[in-house]
């Protein structure tokens, strides 16, 4: 193989992802997405996913095959003579590549809804932590309690409208599922909080939160359902919790909605498809780009050409910056 060289040194590309094609998308994304930035971010997401997927595969859990799917996600990028870059995506929630695509879709779908609310508030609802064995039951219990509160609000002719996100964190052997909910106004937020406290007598009042939404709210709402990585040493990305713990969280959330619209707001599907992940280049040529982790990008093995700059330099960034890079599917372009 000859010395790798950058495809972008020779070709100026612009990208129109599915999220930036229509006029209404432009309201969310601003200028058309920059292909180089987009592809580099995807390479970076792939790199981080590769780092965290091995410990999950090594667990030999019942999800092993699914974790392997993620290993194979976007390994081959097929560029055609129309400039279309397609691949097979695993679509799992623990895949950082797929999750960024999903996040972009959710932001695009729900941004107009939240922007259309006169005085949106964010409510955080918690209850005491639970063991891994009780996690699934506890999530279902809380979802049921939430539904009852919505039913009651409807009966009282004070329906609540909003979007609910489920997140799970972990500390000292215990799991902490909680809801972040955006509602239309303070009255709805206070109602939700007071009904939640009544139905969760063990929940501490100071562990709940009601606050006015700001411009970061949408991003906060749609980021990962759980923390996906941490960085303890330079250039070393790790799972934030032991692999067994991550496995429990992923199993509890498997095929469940993490984001739920209610009160008549149209649900945005969390599922993504390969078409939604497609990248469009102006550069028209037929190339199979193969993912090469040590290079931090996809490579044309017939020429040694690199599809993007290496993602490795981005791994040297701080954890905060990495979180930003990985989470930030659209906001960065606005
Ligand atoms: Zn994937």
Image (cartoon, helix red, strand yellow):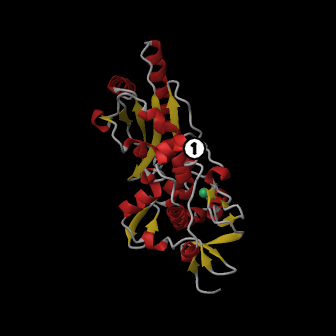
- Judge by depth and name the residue closer to the eye, 121 or 234: 121
Asked which quadrant contains residue 308, the reply is bottom right
- How many numbered tags mark residues here? 1
Q: Position of residue 317 (x, y in %)?
A: 38, 68
Q: Give the left or right position of residue 80, taking residue 271 as reference.
A: right
Q: Name the residue rendered at 29%, 33% in the picture.
A: 205
Residue 228 in sight in this render: no
Quarter of the rendered structure image containing ligand 1: bottom right
Q: Is residue 138 above or below residue 312?
A: above
Q: Position of residue 240 (x, y in %)?
A: 43, 59
Q: Is residue 158 above or below residue 42?
A: above
- Judge by depth and name the residue closer to the eye, 317 or 130: 317
Q: Quickly name the residue at label 1.
A: 22
Q: Position of residue 28 (x, y in %)?
A: 47, 44
Q: Secondary structure at mark 1?
A: loop
Asked which quadrant contains residue 162, the reply is top left
Residue 212 in sight in this render: yes
Q: Residues within 10 Å of mark 1 (few under 14, many from 20)?
A: few
Q: Name the residue rendered at 63%, 50% in the picture.
A: 276
Dividing the image into 4 quarters, which one contains the N terminus? Answer: bottom right
- Judge by depth and name the residue closer to the eye, 196 or 157: 157
Q: Give the left or right position of residue 289, taking residue 28 as reference.
A: right
Q: Outermost residue toward the left?
A: 206
Q: Position of residue 31 (x, y in %)?
A: 48, 52
The verdict on label 1 being within 8 Å of ligand 1 is no
Q: Is residue 178 above or below residue 65?
A: above
Q: Give the left or right position of residue 310, taking residue 179 as reference.
A: right
Q: Outermost residue toward the bottom?
A: 2
Asked which quadrant contains residue 270, the reply is top right
């Amino acid at each position: 193989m000859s010395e790798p060289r950058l495809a972008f040194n020779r070709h100026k590309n612009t990208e129109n992802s599915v999220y930036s094609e229509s006029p209404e998308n432009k309201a969310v994304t601003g200028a058309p997405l920059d292909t180089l930035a987009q592809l580099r971010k995807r390479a970076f997401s792939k790199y981080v996913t590769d780092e965290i997927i091995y410990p999950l595969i090594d667990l030999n859990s019942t999800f092993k095959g699914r974790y392997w799917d993620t290993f194979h996600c976007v390994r081959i990028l097929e560029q055609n003579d129309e400039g279309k870059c397609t691949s097979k995506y695993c679509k799992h929630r623990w895949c950082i590549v797929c999750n960024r695509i999903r996040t972009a879709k959710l932001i695009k779908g729900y941004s107009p809804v939240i922007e259309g609310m006169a005085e949106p508030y964010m409510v955080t609802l918690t209850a005491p932590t639970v063991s891994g064995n009780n996690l699934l039951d506890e999530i279902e219990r809380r979802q049921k309690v939430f539904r009852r509160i919505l039913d009651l609000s409807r009966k009282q002719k004070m329906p609540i409208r909003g979007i609910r996100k489920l997140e799970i964190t972990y500390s000292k052997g215990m799991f902490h599922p909680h809801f972040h909910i955006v509602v239309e106004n303070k009255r709805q937020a206070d109602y939700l909080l007071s009904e939640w406290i009544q139905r969760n007598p063990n929940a501490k009042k100071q562990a709940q939160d009601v606050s006015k939404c700001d411009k970061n709210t949408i991003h906060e709402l749609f980021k990962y359902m759980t923390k996906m990585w941490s960085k303890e040493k330079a250039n070393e990305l790790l799972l934030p919790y032991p692999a067994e713990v991550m496995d429990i969280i992923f199993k509890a959330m498997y095929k469940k909605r993490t984001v739920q619209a209610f009160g008549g707001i149209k649900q945005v599907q969390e599922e993504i498809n390969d078409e939604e992940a497609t990248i469009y280049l102006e550069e028209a040529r037929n190339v199979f780009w193969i993912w090469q982790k040590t290079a931090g990008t996809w490579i044309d093995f017939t020429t040694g050409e690199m599809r993007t700059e290496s993602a490795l330099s981005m791994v040297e960034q701080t954890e905060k910056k990495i979180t930003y890079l990985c989470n930030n599917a659209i906001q960065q372009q606005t």
